Image (cartoon, rainbow, N blue to C red):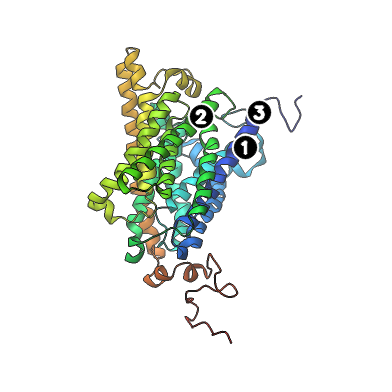
Amino acid sequence: MATEAAPEWLNKGDNSWQLTASSFVALQSIGLVIIYGGIVKKKWAINSAFMALYAFAATLIFWTLWGFRMSFGDPLFLDVVGQPDFSVLTQKFMLAEGFVGLYPAATLVFFQFVFAAITLVLIAGALLGRMNFKAWMLFVPLWLTFSYTVGAFSIWSPKGFLFKAGVMDFAGGFVIHLSSGIAGFTAAYWVGPRIPKDRESFPPNNIIMTLVGAGLLWIGWAGFNGGAPYAVNIDSSLAIYNTHLCTATSLLVWLCLDYMKFGKPSVIGAVQGMVTGLVCITPAAGLVQVWAALIMGVLSGSIPWFTMMVLHKKIKFLKHVDDTLAIFHTHAIAGTLGGLLAGLFAEPNLNRLFFGDDPKFVGLIYAIKNGRTAAGLHQIGMQIAGMAFILVLNVVITSIICLIIKIVTPLRLSVEEMTIGDDTVHGEDAYAVWGDGETYEQSIHGKQLYPSHV
């Protein structure tokens, strides 16, 4: 029965799932905190993990103040970005029915926050091991405000110009992954590289911890793609299944390619293959059939592998930019691939489940089959247009942000700070392995020799 706390418009099942999906996506950011802490050199474990945790926390503040309304509010100009206001701070707005779904706006605001947060966390992966933490503290709110909100409004908001034009991005292949991959690569260019010693050798300090984080990232993706329909429905179920199938296939393909080229099955390689599978299926998860998800897994495990392991070593500019965790390949390349394949494989009935009864959303192979080739080619064109918009937006805005921050504080740590790592940046070490919490290596604090034991 309807009550003041549960009005007639509230669907408790949808609301429960949306909050659960949001929590899953939030755990993905924590998974990345763990991955970053384990996949880098020991001297960077704290800094890398904390860059991710800071981004998660800071994003929530600025998302609440103006980010959500800029991403999903009333248009500010040209249907590109929304008007910033403080509506989210009001009880009236948060407890009223959201603009999608049969649940309060508070649920929708939180669900979209965890997507915004993980985008910033992913960007950090390209900058580990040398970015000035003060510069990172400034970068997060600036990039969220001037880049993420524009991409989210344009492609995801029902009022956005690319959404109305027909760009398909089921759960963030463009808005999150292509965006973070391009922004991370661009920021890495402006920040500059790690010291030569770290670029030449950057072994993980804890692969088991990396695998734990990877597991949280993978399982959390059930909320990432399963929450995209904004409801507990059959499309949500299919999206979750397609996500796991594509990911498992991608991991195995990447593993086999590593085996054939290097003679050993790489654990880190398997994690990369897992990530590219998750990213590739994201823009298409609830729009394609299971057989298409399988094909996408094969392609996401092979094409990004080729760009990372072969092309990267041959293209001078790619080698010049120090993208620490290869975010460009795992997110920009895999997100682009997924967006194109969504335009190819999107099935009309599934499109109707997600987008409603709008004939402009159609995969090329089904358009050809149904005698609507022009519509299918138009869909591919719109996918390319959406990708081009996100690419240009992030190159330009990220560059401007980095150049502005550079006026205020250095983007890059000093050579001494990069040589020592966590102890000089945070005054802390990840692992206490000597005496009463002292590290074996000499500390930046005085650099004195440890007293001998009597």
Q: Nearer the viewer, residue 330 or 89?
A: 330
What secondary structure is marked by label 3? helix
Q: Which residue in the structure is indicated by mark 2?
A: 241
- Count residues near mark 2 (Cα–Cα under 10 Å), then give few for <14, some for 14-19, many for 20+: some
Q: Nearer the viewer, residue 345 or 40?
A: 40
What secondary structure is marked by label 2? helix
What type is the residue that disc 1 sits on?
Leu
Q: Which residue in the structure is indicated by mark 1?
A: 19
Q: Which residue in the structure is indicated by mark 3?
A: 13
Question: Which quarter of the figure has residue 148?
Answer: top left
- Count residues near mark 3 (Cα–Cα under 10 Å), then give few for <14, some for 14-19, many for 20+: few
How far apart are labels 2 and 3 at the CA level? 20 Å
Q: Image check: 172 left or right of 86?
A: left
In primary-sequence order, the first of circles 1 and 2 is: 1
Q: Position of residue 191 (x, y in %)?
A: 36, 59
Q: Image check: 216 left or right of 264?
A: right
Mark 1 in CB contact with mark 2 (< 8 angstroms): no
What secondary structure is marked by label 1? helix
In primary-sequence order, the first of circles 1 and 3 is: 3
What type is the residue that disc 2 sits on?
Tyr
How far apart are labels 1 and 2 at the CA level? 20 Å
In this picture, is 125 found above or below 171? Answer: below
Q: Position of residue 251 (x, y in %)?
A: 42, 39
Q: Position of residue 202 (x, y in %)?
A: 39, 60
**Badge number at residue 305:** none
Identify the image quadrant of the N terminus.
top right
Identify the image quadrant of the C terminus.
bottom right
